[in-house]
Amino acid sequence: MSHDSRTAPRICPLCEATCGLTLTIEGTTVTGARGDHDDVFSQGFICPKGASFGGLDADPDRLRTPLVRTDGVLREATWSEAFDAVAAKIPALTREHGEQAVGVYLGNPNVHTMAGGLYPPLLLSALGTRNVFTASTLDQMPKHVSSGLLFGDAQAIPVPDLDRTAHLLLIGANPLESNGSLCTAPDFPGRLRALRRRGGTLTVVDPRRTRTARLADRHAAIRPGTDALLLAALTQVLLEEKLTDPGALGEHLEGLDELTEAIADFTPEAVAAACDLDAETIRAIARELAAAPAAAVYGRIGSCTV
């Protein structure tokens, strides 16, 4: 190593698994990236995205400064020039066409930095537009909507405790190939294998026999687009057979009677044909989920996009 080489522990910013990285840096150039074995969370795991961190940082096409369009041509500019251009054009545009004439697209890195999480709400509030598009609108918006309705906060997305779960019901996800997401779980595949090794149960609901489905104790090959019917039937069984016990959470729970009434007709027998699953299989999944000493349900993009 040259005299100006150093290593730096960092957290990978490329997804929300937050794996630890050990970067090798020469001057200002990242010359290598490997998993940080001292990271208590990821324990040295690294995926191809993290391993390519140096190449991404040094990509010649990477934007390193704002670009301002002059006479139809983009040119590099200072931040002051860029903000002045925005200040000159946006207010005039909204005065002429209204606030909804502005659309905002927030790219994925906004989710993985503190600044990216704090700045957009202020910008959107100032603009007053409802036209907001993000990677999340394609990928996970139903989770935000349901979390907002259930818990009062669209950002309060619950994640399964993979390391302590005895039974994991996984719907529309294939973490053995995707490495998982919206779970903050470095080495998701390894954690699933550990679940199996300690005697836990993995149930996978997926139309395809994916690598994750092949690992499962039970693979329910559901008909695409019928996840809501299956979930309704599972809930109907849990309530009808009195397998629910809110316990100390009961005082914070509202709407259970309304839910029971709303899904009363969604029995396993009623949805079986539509889901292309056997009614007894649906009933068994619900019962096993309830009988486990600790259980979790994790739905991902398959269930988010139907």
Image (cartoon, grey):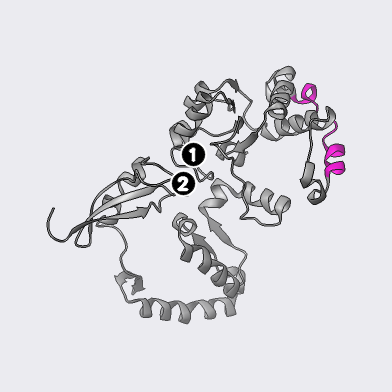
Expressed as whole percent of the image width and height from the top left, the position of residue 20 reads 38, 48
* Whether residue 209 is visible: no
The vertical placement of 170 against 252, above or below, is above
Magenta range: 256-271
Q: Is residue 35 magenta?
A: no
Q: Report the side of 175 relative to 154 (left or right).
A: left
Expressed as whole percent of the image width and height from the top left, the position of residue 142 reads 64, 47
Circle on res. 180: 1
Query: Residue, x 60% and y 22% (percent of image)?
Result: 221
Badge 2, how many Cα within 10 Å: few under 14, some, many 20+? many
* Figure quadrant of residue 241: top right
Q: Are marks 2 and 1 in contact (CB under 8 Å)?
A: yes
* Nearest to N terminus: mark 2 or mark 1: 2
Circle on res. 17: 2
Badge 1, how many Cα within 10 Å: few under 14, some, many 20+? many
The vertical placement of 293 against 123, above or below, is above
Query: Residue, x 57% and y 68% (percent of image)?
Result: 121
Prevalent SS, magenta region: helix
Identify residue type, mark 1. Gly
Q: Is residue 265 magenta?
A: yes
Mark 2: secondary structure: loop
Mark 1: secondary structure: loop
CA–CA distance in space, label 2 to label 1: 8 Å
The vertical placement of 276 against 60, above or below, is above
Which corner quadrant holds the C terminus? top right
Identify residue type, mark 2. Ala
* Whether residue 304 is visible: yes
Expressed as whole percent of the image width and height from the top left, the position of residue 21 reads 34, 49
Q: Nearer the viewer, residue 260 or 172?
A: 260
Expressed as whole percent of the image width and height from the top left, the position of residue 244 reads 79, 34
Query: Residue, x 71% and y 21% (percent of image)?
Result: 284
